[in-house]
Image (tube, rainbow, N blue to C red):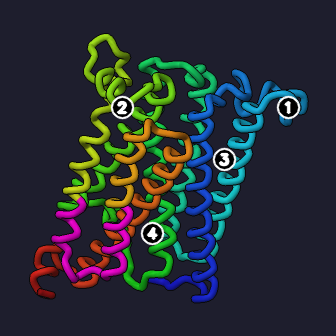
Amino acid sequence: MEEPSSNKSVAQFSIFAWSLTAYAVIVILWGAFVRISGSGDGCGEHWPLCHGELIPYQELRETLKTWIEFGHRIKSGLFGVGVICLVFFAFKLFPAKNIIRKLALCCLCFTVLEGFLGAQLVLARLVADDASLRRVIVIGLHLTNTLVLLAVLTSIAKLSKLSTKFNHISELLPAGKAKSSIVGFVLLAVTGSWAALASTLFPSSSLLSGIMADFDTTSHVLVRVRILHPVLALIVWGLVRSWIKYLDQNISPRIRGRAWFFISGNIVFGLTTLLLLSPTWMKMLHLLLANLSWIALIILMIEEKRLRLERNLPLDQVLSAKN
């Protein structure tokens, strides 16, 4: 396979990809703040315009919600520009059929889908105090797409500097213990978004009253399903622990340790957030740790795939050979 144009250019491309990944996390956090602050209707029923204008000067002077929502749209728009630049440089630096090109196109597609799902929340008025089933479904789809987009960005940044040559995107798909951990984390994140929405729309005065509401058949469905999140958190923690233990010393201790640190720290912080009735700053930090955990798991999965690909063996045989 033909090599990229130059090592220096590829290094710069990798830095740009990592920077775009970090920026994506910032956009995600700001989007969460839009929901937590009830500012999803800050631009009215208009999208992509805000209150029917490119820049709503009057509303920006009068309404904080408009500042929050409009700021999120600007950040999202800049992210879209960054993804277009990523695709351009991927095609300029890497040869035809290179996996970086394919992943860059996937990144663009998921970015467009991200914008579409975000638009549905606004245009269908699934914002502010809306607690409809449709909002629950769209939020779940929105978050799943966000995680896939973040995984693709992380893969681009990581693979652009690896000497191991992946040829097909299918080679990056999780399998075995990695698959159960990755899928489990996605489900955990989706239930987390529902739990966060429930605590925003239906706040509890105390931990006891919140737990009682979880098991009250008259409570809203969002309240009754939020118990799934802490339960899934413990299950995912066990799955990731089993996966890392399975990999043992075959993967860099730094990469294994980082994944374990973030996933364990995030679960402890999440439980603390629950006990303290989910203050806004803790919700935001919990989400940040969740995104860092996801990125660390994707890197761990890529390292596992690299190990298998370099030896052209099923992973079980690779691990046996090294042990």
Q: Is residue 173 visible?
A: yes
Q: Quick check: 193 above or below 96?
A: above
Mark 1 and mark 2 in contact? Answer it, CB < 8 Å. Answer: no
Report how far apart the C-alphas of labels 4 and 2 lie in the structure: 49 Å
Q: Can you tell which of label 1 and label 4 is closer to the viewer?
A: 1
Q: Which residue in the structure is indicated by mark 1?
A: 56
Mark nearest the camera among 4 and 2 is: 2
Q: Which residue is mark 2?
A: 207
Q: Is residue 243 magenta?
A: yes
From what the image shows, is residue 164 above or below residue 39? below
Among numbered discs 1 and 4, the one appearing first in the sequence: 1
54 displayed left or right of 320: right
Q: Earlier in the sequence, mark 4 or mark 2?
A: 4
Disc 1 residue type? Pro
Point out the tag, 3 or 4, that comes first from the N-terminus: 3
The kind of residue tagged 4 is Ile
